[in-house]
Image: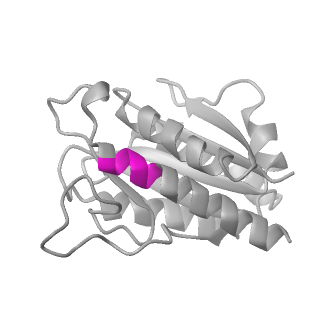
């Protein structure tokens, strides 16, 4: 069975909801999907490191704060130097997603950080796998309206509750999860 781990930090719950939709899309392919939430102190739950080591694919997620990942995600990334040293994640498929309050919000800086983390670990990066909805007829509820190729981009307005997240972004999260799982399956053979 294909095993995927989603490891993420969420400051206010919006990135967590995006992670749940990524999980839903990946699980729809029949993959086994574990969700590991980095806590407020930047730590993985019990057994988290082992789950990542056993996975075929890893999806990283972080909100974009001040043009980069949250410090909690960065603490996790810095702590990954131990599996980096032994190349525990080498050859695994990696992907990533981020959420911020504005349409741009320097989200690509966070995606670039996630790509760099994956490259440091000699992982194989895959992006969103979908074209953007960028014609005049398209709107915020269409798939990949934010045009993320390198990873999933989600926007949660600063005054929006978790329940008010953009439905199109959540559907895009599911499509992203499905795409990543399909890539992991194709690489795994």
- Quarter of the picture containing the C terminus is bottom right
The picture quadrant where one finds residue 178 is: bottom right
Residue 118 horizontal/vertical position (percent): 61, 64
Q: Residue at the spot x=20%, y=59% of the render?
A: 104
Q: Is residue 132 visible?
A: yes
Say left or right for 85 vs 167: right
Above or below, comparing residue 60 to residue 104 in the picture: above
Q: Residue at the spot x=28%, y=36% of the render?
A: 165
Above or below, comparing residue 71 to residue 37 in the picture: below
Residue 48 horizontal/vertical position (percent): 72, 34
Q: Residue at the spot x=35%, y=33% of the render?
A: 14
Q: Is residue 123 visible?
A: no
The picture quadrant where one finds residue 131 is: bottom left
Q: Nearer the viewer, residue 13 or 22?
A: 22
Q: Which residues are magenta?
A: 168-173
Residue 74 horizontal/vertical position (percent): 48, 45
Specify the farthest residue to the front: 137
Q: Residue at the spot x=77%, y=65% of the render?
A: 185
Residue 26 horizontal/vertical position (percent): 63, 50
Above or below, comparing residue 143 to residue 35 in the picture: below
Q: Nearer the viewer, residue 126 or 176?
A: 176
Q: Is residue 169 magenta?
A: yes
Q: Is residue 114 magenta?
A: no
């Amino acid at each position: 069975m294909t095993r995927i781990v989603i490891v993420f930090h969420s400051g206010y719950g919006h990135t967590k909801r995006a992670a749940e939709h990524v999980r839903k899309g990946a699980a729809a392919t029949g993959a086994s999907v574990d969700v590991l939430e980095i806590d407020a102190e930047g730590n993985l739950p019990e057994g988290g490191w082992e789950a990542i080591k056993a996975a075929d694919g890893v999806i990283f997620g972080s909100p974009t704060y001040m043009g980069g990942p949250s410090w909690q995600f960065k603490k996790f990334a810095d702590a990954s130097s131990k599996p980096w040293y032994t190349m525990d994640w080498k050859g695994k498929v990696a992907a990533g997603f981020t959420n911020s309050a504005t349409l741009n919000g320097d989200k690509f800086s966070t995606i670039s950080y996630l790509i760099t983390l994956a490259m440091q670990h000699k992982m194989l990066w895959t992006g969103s796998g979908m074209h953007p909805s960028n014609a005049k007829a398209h709107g915020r509820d269409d798939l990949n309206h934010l045009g993320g190729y390198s990873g999933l981009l989600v926007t949660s307005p600063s005054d929006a509750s978790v329940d008010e997240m953009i439905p199109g972004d959540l559907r895009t999260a599911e499509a992203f999860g499905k795409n990543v799982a399909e890539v992991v399956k194709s690489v795994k053979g």
